[in-house]
Image (cartoon, helix red, strand yellow):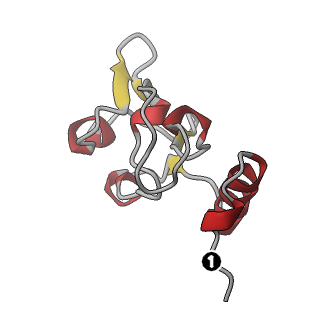
Amino acid sequence: MNALDNTWGLPRELIPWGPTIDPGRCRGSGECVRFCPNNVYEFDEPRGHALVARFHQCTVMCNNCVAVCPNGAISFPDQEAFLDAVSEMRKSRGFMKYIVKA
């Protein structure tokens, strides 16, 4: 997946947005695996819990799976810090002219 993402103008592999699963909280319901349309998660049978198998397949700024996890095991980066990081990446890659100033 090397194509530029239409929303952010950066290769998706550089965008630090995706879920983290707390294995201590995950009880193996598999709801995230069944719910995610982008196939981000897999169920790790030997360990009995879900894992993030395809981080960069997560849709940027989507965190809908948080609501389906019955144990609160899924988290995402802080959105404000994430947006600041993306803005800095865009600046460093020469996207300054595309940044709208209020």
The percent position of residue 56, horizontal first and vertical second, equals 47, 34
- Quadrant position of residue 67: bottom left
Query: What residue type is disc 1 on?
Result: Val
User: Is 30 situated left or right of 49 in this image?
Assistant: left
**Nearer to me, 37 or 71:** 37
Picture quarter with the N terminus: top left
Query: Residue at 32% across / 42% down in the picture?
Result: 32
In the image, is residue 71 above or below residue 101?
A: above
In the image, is residue 96 above or below residue 21?
A: below
User: Is 56 situated left or right of 81 in this image?
Assistant: left
Query: Residue at 42% across / 33% down in the picture?
Result: 3
User: Is 23 situated left or right of 27 in this image?
Assistant: right
Residue that numbered label 1 is attached to? 100
The percent position of residue 8, horizontal first and vertical second, equals 51, 54
- Quadrant position of residue 85: bottom right
The percent position of residue 41, horizontal first and vertical second, equals 37, 31
In the image, is residue 80 above or below residue 87?
A: below
Query: Residue at 46% across / 40% down in the picture?
Result: 4
**Nearer to me, 44 or 81:** 81
SS class, disc 1: loop
Query: Residue at 23% across / 45% down in the picture?
Result: 35
